[in-house]
Each structure stands twice: as structure tokens, then as C-alpha cells.
């Protein structure tokens, strides 16, 4: 029997905006899919692309990175660095065969609980639509 | 070549440089290898032709630690490599004398090296003495990268997985690369251990992705990684893909402009958010 597998999403969120935004989504009782696993980082500038690579290799279906809006970084410029790094990392992953829809990068502020819930729902739907395609990069023993 | 030999002889004699780094031909076997030339030797066996594949910048950090002033023979691509080293303050410009020579392309395994097809400049951007013919700068074509980009994601992964699976993790690519010089490489790091040391597909994938990513905006496409790879993994493809990406995203061609800071260590508040979007969506 074929069981529809729920996609697993890794969300790397910055402590000051996006994580607080996710918190707000919770306290405001917004409904969003339970597919999202959240990792909190001090700043989106902390996000080393190796984390994204590792997530795909370990079998995650999608990776989402979010930080403060440009100009709002708690540390001043962390998200500008993040933007450059992630843009390049994304090109590399696409080049070796990760479907572009499996990566999602966005800015979510602490007040945007609704946006967080929306982004998660939309991303989950997109990944469900991809369920027929191969999960590239994932370790063989984890691939479905 | 004759002029260059004479110039180096002169520089060595009047003490402007302590040693010169160049290519030496072994007359018995006809092999050409990188070597150090000193004051009291003849430079008759110093050559520069299509057999001079090695990137001499690799040897520079050791030499500048030992000598005050080092002369170095540079092809176009090696010169780009040198620029990245200077920008990262690994080598001090005051310690080197750059002898640029107009490269006519090098040959590898009996045919023109792949990297020469994507040559951006045949003359080094940093040069103290210039020899030979300087050609017009041109934009690399990256025909192989474009070929991959036309494939579907699954096809691309199949293509790369076949190669990654072959990797035996000898790290020859890392050792030969002039830009890979971290004291503790992320692949050797035990805590946290991002990359498993065993040679299996998942760990190899991690290694090749992170190797390519760490060189983004720094790799000058000298092609040494691919040349030394015992399993012939096309690492230049990954490097070139990122070189192309960095050029498209930030308009930077690594190593072609002296003193240009690598794009991933600076920030630009004016970057549009569209760079975060997928390319093939």
C-alpha cells in the first residue's frame, strides 16, 4: 500500500525576527503544517551553507531559511551577508540537481506570524507537489 | 622566452630577487616541472611552453617565508590565482616580482587543456615585467556548464552522483589548491563533524559541495584540482558554475581585477532580493 509521505522541512530561523515570528504564529493560534522542524540561529548571518547541504544529504525534503528584513538585522548587517551566501549556495545546489522548489528563502519579521504560517503552508504544498520527483542528494538508505 | 630568461638572470645577479620560481625541463626525459632557480646556476633549462601546466602560485607561500624576495613566472590563470592570494593577505606584494608571460595555452594528456577554452586573460593582471604577446581579454564561455544547466534536476544529480561516488577522499584537490589553506579544514574538523571521513556517496557529496562553495568568488580556474584528481571528477564544472553564478549575481570575475575583494566577504545593501530566487523556476 502506498502511503503518502509527509515532506520534512528544515526551517533555519534567526533568533530576533523569524523565530519570534514563528512564536507569534503559535501564540496567535495560526494553523500551519507540522512538517516544519525549526532550528534557531542567532542571526541569519550565522547560516553556513554547509547546514543547508547537510539537511539535504540527511534526507530533508526542503530547506527554508529566514531572517530579519534587510535593514532590520539585530546585528546590523548579518542578513546582507546571508543574502549573498545563500544566493550562491542556492545556485550550487541547483547545479548539482536539487529542485529549485525545494529551497525557500525569505524575510519574516517578529510581527509577521501570519506570514510565517502562510510561507510554511505554501512551502509544504509545493513540496507535496514534488513528491513524485526524486529526492536528490539524500543518502541512499534514506531515499524513498 | 629568451628575454625572460635574460631578465631573470639579471634580477638574480643584482640581488633584486633571491630565487626565481619557474618551469625546468629535464633534458633527459623532456619532462617539465616547477622548480626554484638560484643565483649561481645557468638558466638554460628554464622553459615556458605548452607543457607548463602547474600553477606556480602554490609554491609561493613556502618560498616567501624563506626568502626576502621571490620572482615568479606567471601565466594568465596563475596570475588570477595570485591576485586572490594577495587580496587575502596570504602573500605580501612587496615580497614578489611578477614576471608575466603571454600564455599560448597549455596541453594536458596530448590535447589542449579544458581550462584554456574558458581562459579569461592570457596575461596576469599583476605584472612587474611583461614578456610575450598579450591577447585581448575575453569572457569565458562555460559551454560545459551550460550543457549541464539544460538538464533536468534529476539528470544533473545522476550525472554528478556517478562522479561523487567515485571519489576516494584523498583530498588531492584540496592540497593542490592555492586557495584552500585553512589551518583546520572543515573536512578534518571533528567537532562538529560536518563531513564524514569515509568515502561514500553522502559524505563525498558534502565534501564536493563545500569545497566548491568555499571557493566561490575566489577560484581563479587554474584547473589544478581536476588535473590531480585520481578519479577524474570534473571539479572544474562546479568551480565554473559558481564562477558563472558569482559573475551573474555580483558582476565579479575572481582574480581579474587586482585588489578586488572577494564578493562573499563583503556585503552590498543594494543587492536585490531577486538573487535569492531560483533560477529555473
Image (cartoon, coloured by chain):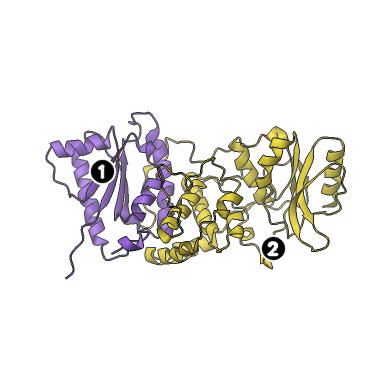
Q: In the rendered image of this protein, which colour is used for chain B?
A: yellow
- Packing grade of label 2 (10 A; few <14, some 14-19, many >=20) is some
Chain letter of disc 1 in the image: A
Name the mark on residue A38.
1
Residue A43 shown left or right of residue A91 in the figure: left
Q: How many marks?
A: 2
**Residue B169 seen in the current view:** yes
Residue B88 at x, y percent in the picture: 58, 37
**Residue B277 seen in the current view:** no
Check disc 2 and report its element: helix, strand or loop: strand
Chain letter of disc 2 in the image: B
Q: Quadrant of residue B224?
A: bottom right
Q: Residue at x 83, y 63 (%)?
A: B28
Q: Residue at x 86, y 53 (%)?
A: B44
Judging by the rendered image, the residue that carries numbered circle 2 is B107
Q: Residue at x 39, y 51 (%)?
A: A53
Residue B275 at x, y percent in the picture: 40, 46
Q: Is residue B85 above or below residue B164?
A: above
Q: Which chain is purple?
A: A
Residue B266 shown left or right of residue B118 in the figure: left
> Could you tell me which quadrant the C terminus of chain B lies in?
bottom left
Q: Nearer the viewer, residue B132 or B35?
A: B35
Residue A3 at x, y percent in the picture: 17, 65
Q: Is residue A71 above or below residue B43?
A: above
Q: Quadrant of residue B154?
A: bottom left
Amino acid at each position: 500500500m502506498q502511503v503518502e509521505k509527509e515532506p520534512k522541512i528544515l526551517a533555519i530561523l534567526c533568533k530576533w525576527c523569524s523565530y519570534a515570528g514563528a512564536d507569534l504564529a503559535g501564540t496567535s493560534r495560526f494553523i500551519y503544517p507540522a512538517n516544519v522542524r525549526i532550528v534557531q540561529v542567532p542571526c541569519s548571518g550565522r547560516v553556513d551553507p554547509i547546514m543547508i547541504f547537510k539537511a539535504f544529504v540527511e534526507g530533508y525534503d526542503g530547506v527554508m531559511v529566514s531572517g530579519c528584513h534587510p535593514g532590520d538585522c539585530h546585528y546590523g548587517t548579518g542578513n546582507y551577508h546571508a543574502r549573498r551566501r545563500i544566493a550562491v549556495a542556492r545556485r550550487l545546489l541547483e547545479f548539482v540537481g536539487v529542485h529549485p522548489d525545494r529551497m525557500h528563502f525569505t524575510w519574516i519579521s517578529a510581527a509577521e506570524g501570519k506570514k510565517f504560517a502562510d510561507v510554511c503552508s505554501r512551502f509544504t504544498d509545493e513540496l507535496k507537489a514534488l513528491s513524485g520527483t526524486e529526492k536528490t542528494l539524500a543518502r541512499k538508505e534514506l531515499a524513498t | 622566452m629568451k628575454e625572460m630568461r635574460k631578465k631573470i638572470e639579471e634580477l638574480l645577479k643584482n640581488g633584486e630577487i633571491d630565487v626565481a620560481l619557474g618551469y625546468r625541463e629535464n633534458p633527459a626525459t623532456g619532462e617539465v616541472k616547477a622548480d626554484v632557480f638560484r643565483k649561481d646556476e645557468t638558466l638554460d633549462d628554464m622553459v615556458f611552453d605548452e607543457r607548463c601546466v602547474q600553477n606556480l602560485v602554490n609554491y609561493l607561500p613556502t618560498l616567501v617565508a624563506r626568502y626576502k624576495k621571490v620572482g615568479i613566472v606567471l601565466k594568465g590563470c596563475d596570475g588570477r590565482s595570485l591576485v586572490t592570494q594577495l587580496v587575502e593577505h596570504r602573500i605580501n606584494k612587496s615580497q614578489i616580482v611578477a614576471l608575466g608571460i603571454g600564455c599560448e595555452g597549455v596541453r594536458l594528456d596530448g590535447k589542449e587543456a579544458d581550462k584554456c577554452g574558458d581562459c579569461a586573460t592570457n596575461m596576469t593582471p599583476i605584472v612587474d615585467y611583461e614578456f610575450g604577446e598579450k591577447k585581448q581579454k575575453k569572457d569565458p564561455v562555460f559551454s560545459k556548464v551550460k550543457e549541464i544547466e539544460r538538464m533536468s534536476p534529476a539528470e544533473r544529480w545522476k550525472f554528478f552522483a556517478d562522479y561523487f561516488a567515485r571519489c576516494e577522499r584523498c583530498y588531492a584537490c584540496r592540497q593542490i589548491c592555492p586557495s584552500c589553506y585553512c589551518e583546520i579544514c572543515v573536512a578534518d574538523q571533528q567537532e562538529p563533524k560536518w563531513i564524514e571521513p569515509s568515502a561514500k556517496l553522502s559524505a563525498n557529496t558534502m565534501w564536493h559541495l563545500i569545497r566548491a562553495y568555499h571557493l566561490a568568488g575566489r577560484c581563479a580556474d587554474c584547473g589544478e584540482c581536476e588535473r590531480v584528481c585520481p578519479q577524474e571528477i570534473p571539479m572544474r564544472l562546479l568551480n565554473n558554475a559558481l564562477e558563472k553564478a558569482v559573475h551573474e549575481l555580483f558582476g565579479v570575475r575572481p582574480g581579474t581585477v587586482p585588489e578586488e575583494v572577494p564578493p562573499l566577504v563583503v556585503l552590498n545593501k543594494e543587492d536585490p532580493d531577486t538573487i535569492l530566487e531560483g533560477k529555473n523556476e
